[in-house]
Every structure is written in structure tokens, then in C-alpha cells.
Image (cartoon, rainbow, N blue to C red):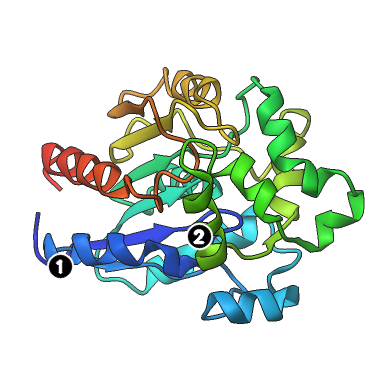
């Protein structure tokens, strides 16, 4: 690992990019050039995103991938990409396109080919799917909905505090695209899982995740069975979708750093 290795952190739906702040500190201290650029249209702060969510609307998976691809094109070397939820899907797409040196996908949204659709996933995303018009809008979660989708494995008070600190409206389009992925041969949720020349991939799952239950992550792992590249998986059995921002985030960060060191990165 060289001191200039760039690491891009990619957030998922309903969390602002600044939620990666503690991770940036830890990775910078470890010698990486860490940054967390937001999605296209993301305002600079949580407050701005809540007050003016319109600019985030109608951005789909391809838009987000292209956005990060342009950022990567401005770097001197391929970055390590670390994504949570839909950010984990984006990280896998970038890795499959050979735009990243390695990827860590934490509770990643399901990619094309992944069939399990647990009831808890449907409930977690119902605020978006209950209205077809939400495909072209942003949708905010209530504190109660956030607790089910993110904070079900932590105390209610902590979940509410995280909601107040980091939650923002999210574009509905990526969810509609992912939901239709297995019916669309050209789905933007498709990842080049057969690429044997790509860098290493780590899939991280939370055993109590309602939004991306472990069945989805295990099925994602199977999609990579035809690739000769390194694909590892690790489970935090007592964790849910908030695992990157709640009181136990450092355990996940440290496991990520340990894995990167083992890959020579």
C-alpha cells in the first residue's frame, strides 16, 4: 500500500455523503487518500438536501456510475471503492468495469441475477414503491421507517439520533430499476460478475439487516462463481443496515482495513 492510494466512499439511498466522515478520518490516518463525493445532484450538506431535494430526483444507476467514473478519470491511479447499500452496487459495477483497484460492498443493493426478495426488503422500500410516480421524485423516510430500514438492531434513541443527523430524501429511480432488473436484459443493475481480471471484492453483510437481508448478499456471492478473481464475504451477525454509521461502525471499518491489507492494498 502506498500513501497515495485513493479510496472513494459511495453512499447509498437516504444517507448523505458526509455520513462517511468518521471513515474518512480512519482511512486517512491509515495512509489512504480518502474522499466521499456525493451522488449527482447531491447538495453539500444534510440541511440543504432536506430543504432542496429536487436536484437529486430522477438520477438512475447509470447516471451515478457515470458520475463516479468521471471522478475516477481525474485520479492518477485506480481507487479502492467502498460503497454502502446502493453505493455497494455502484462499487461492484465500477470494479466490474475495471475502473477500481478493489471494492468493498457493504449490505449492497441486489444486482441483476439475484432472485431472493425477502418481505422485509419490500417493507423497507415500500415508501418508494407505493406510488409509481416516485420513480421521478425523491422520497424521504419518517423516523419510524428509518428505524425499520436502518436502525432495527440498535436502540430506538440511537436510531432516531442517526436519522436526525444523516437522513436525506433519496431518488426513487434506482429502486425501480433494481426491481425490474431480472426482467430487463439491459438493466443498469447488471454487473460484470464474470470478469476474472478485476481487482478483489469484499461483500459485507449484516445478519439483522431488513433492507438487504443476508439472503441477498449470499445470492450476490453466487453470481461471482464464474470469476477467478478474489471474492470474499464477511458477516456481522448482530448488525443491520445502519452498520456504517451506528456505534459499531469502527468494527466494520477495521475489518475493511484488515482485508485491504491482506490484499496488498
Residue 13 relative to residue 157: left or right: right
Where is residue 261, by image quadrant?
top left
Q: CA distance from mark 1 to mark 2?
A: 35 Å
Establish if 258 lies above or below 131: above
Does dot 2 land on a helix, a strand or a loop?
A: helix
Give the percent coordinates (x, y) of residue 88. 47, 45
Please indicate, yes or no, whether residue 190 appears anywhere in the rendered image. Answer: yes
Marking on residue 161: 2
Q: Secondary structure at mark 1?
A: loop
Instruction: Give 15 or 162, whichever is nearer the viewer.
Output: 162
Sequence-wise, the earlier of marks 1 and 2 is: 1
Residue 1, position as x, y percentages in the image: 9, 54
Q: Residue at x 22, y 39 (%)?
A: 255
In the picture, the disc for residue 248 is none
Residue 185 appears in the rendering: no
- Looking at the image, is mark 1 or mark 2 nearer the viewer? 2
Badge 2 density bin: few <14, some 14–19, many ≥20, Cα 10 Å: few
- CB-based contact (under 8 Å), mark 1 and mark 2: no
Instruction: List x then y, in percent, for residue 230.
Output: 27, 29
**From the viewer's perspective, is residue 141 above or below residue 238?**
below
Q: Residues within 10 Å of mark 1 (few under 14, many from 20)?
A: some
Name the residue rendered at 71%, 24% in the picture: 119
Q: What residue does disc 1 label?
A: 4
- At x 90%, y 49%, the residue is 131
Amino acid at each position: 500500500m502506498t500513501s497515495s492510494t485513493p479510496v472513494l466512499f459511495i453512499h447509498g439511498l437516504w444517507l448523505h455523503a458526509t455520513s462517511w466522515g468518521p471513515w474518512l478520518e480512519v482511512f486517512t490516518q491509515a495512509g489512504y487518500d480518502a474522499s466521499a463525493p456525493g451522488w449527482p445532484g447531491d447538495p453539500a450538506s444534510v440541511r440543504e438536501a432536506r430543504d432542496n431535494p429536487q436536484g437529486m430526483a430522477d438520477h438512475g444507476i447509470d447516471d451515478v456510475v457515470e458520475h463516479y467514473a468521471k471522478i475516477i478519470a481525474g485520479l492518477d491511479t485506480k481507487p479502492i471503492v467502498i460503497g454502502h447499500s446502493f453505493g455497494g452496487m455502484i462499487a461492484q459495477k465500477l470494479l466490474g468495469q475495471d475502473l477500481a483497484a478493489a471494492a468493498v460492498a457493504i449490505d449492497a443493493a441486489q444486482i441483476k441475477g439475484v432472485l431472493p426478495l425477502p418481505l422485509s426488503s419490500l417493507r423497507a422500500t415500500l415508501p418508494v414503491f407505493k406510488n409509481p410516480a416516485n420513480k421521478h421524485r425523491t422520497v424521504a423516510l419518517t423516523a419510524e421507517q428509518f428505524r425499520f430500514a436502518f436502525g432495527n438492531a440498535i436502540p430506538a434513541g440511537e436510531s432516531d439520533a442517526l436519522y436526525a443527523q444523516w437522513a436525506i430524501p433519496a431518488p426513487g429511480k434506482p429502486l425501480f430499476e433494481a426491481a425490474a432488473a431480472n426482467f430487463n436484459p439491459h438493466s443498469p443493475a447488471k454487473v460484470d460478475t464474470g470478469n476474472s481480471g478485476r481487482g478483489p471484492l469484499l461483500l459485507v453483510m449484516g445478519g439483522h439487516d431488513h433492507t438487504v437481508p443476508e439472503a441477498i448478499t449470499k445470492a450476490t456471492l453466487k453470481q461471482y462463481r464464474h470469476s477467478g478473481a478474489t471474492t470474499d464475504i464477511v458477516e456481522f451477525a448482530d448488525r443491520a443496515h445502519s452498520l456504517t454509521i451506528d456505534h459499531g461502525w469502527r468494527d466494520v471499518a477495521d475489518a475493511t482495513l484488515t482485508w485491504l491489507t491482506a490484499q496488498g492494498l
